[in-house]
Image (cartoon, rainbow, N blue to C red):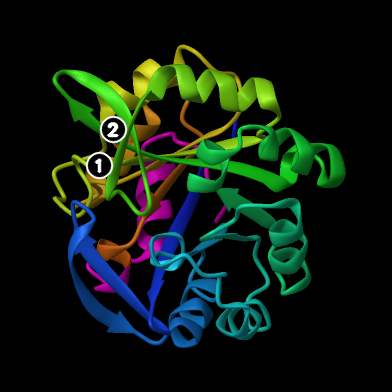
Amino acid sequence: MVTKRIIPCLDIRDGRVVKGVNFKDVKDIDDPVKLAEFYNDSGADELVFYDITASFEGRKLFTGILKDVASCVFIPLTVGGSINTVDDFDRVLKAGADKVSVNSGAIKNPDLIREAAKKYGNQCVVLSMDIARVDGKFRIFAKGGRENTGIDALEWAVQGEANGAGELVVNSIDTDGVRGGFDLELLNEIGKRVSIPIIASGGAGKIEHFKTLFELDRIDAGLAAGIFHSKEVLINDLKKYLKENNIHVRI
């Protein structure tokens, strides 16, 4: 039985953790180092760190904050934000990341995934996809969800795996911050098409949403931000609940 993972997400803007709704209306939450330490000590299986405005602003990811966060956590750390070249992978890994998440950079250069996987291994390369429905179709968005690329999201997931991504993060823009539950339709469609681990992101609003999520066979991890940042749901409590419901988690 696959052990399901619970992953908090730190969206970083101007050196602070922030959270929005549908990738908009962003509000300040807390200091990233303080939150990272809290999650490290609270049962999180991994941590995701996104510099959410780096691609849109056309700059490199802030490695100073990353180094501070990496120095205080002892769980796997996935980092993303303006990853456009293999050199960017190298810089972020040297700053303390265990895995690197690529999004807009892979859209501009699909060979980036292949090149990075060849150099660092598939397990290091995470393809993050920001997805929304457009006229009933799942489309890929770039630059922090601001730009509709027109790319079919289901085909992009398949291509990402073929190019060498070791993991997918499926970010549903439609459910982000709404707290009505994960986008099960989207996740199920992607799960039918790929065999690599899938991390579901966007929509967690209560503890039961994770149980419903993990009832989908192909989902390996649930990623959330708002309900964890607000402490409405504590990760240790969530894991106890999941275990009581016969979902295998690390306690």
How packed is label 1: few (under 14 Cα within 10 Å), some, or many (20 or more)? some
Q: Which residue is mark 2?
A: 212
Helix, strand or loop at mark 1? helix
- Stretch of the chain drawn in magenta: 229-251
In the image, residue 148 lies at what x, y percent?
A: 28, 37
In the image, residue 91 lies at what x, y percent?
A: 74, 68
Residue 87 is left or right of residue 139, and the answer is: right
Residue for point 68% across, 83% down: 71
Asked if the magenta segment contains residue 49, the reply would be no
Residue for point 25% across, 41% down: 209
In the image, residue 56 lies at what x, y percent?
A: 38, 61
Residue type of the residue flagged with mark 2: Thr
Residue 177 is left or right of residue 8, and the answer is: left
Residue 29 vertical placement versus 20 (above, below)? below
Question: How many circles with numbers are drawn on the protein?
Answer: 2
Residue at the extreme right: 119
Residue 70 vertical placement versus 150 (above, below)? below
Residue type of the residue flagged with mark 1: His
Q: Is residue 233 visible?
A: no
- The quadrant of the image that shows the N terminus is top right
Residue for point 69% across, 52% down: 85
Name the disc covering residue 66, or none.
Answer: none
Q: Which residue is mark 1?
A: 209
Q: Nearer the viewer, residue 238 or 83?
A: 83
In the image, residue 213 lies at what x, y percent?
A: 33, 34
Q: Nearer the viewer, residue 53 or 42?
A: 53
Q: CA distance from mark 2 to mark 1?
A: 5 Å
Whether tag 2 and tag 1 are in contact, CB under 8 A, the answer is yes
Residue at the extreme top: 192
Residue for point 58% across, 80% down: 69
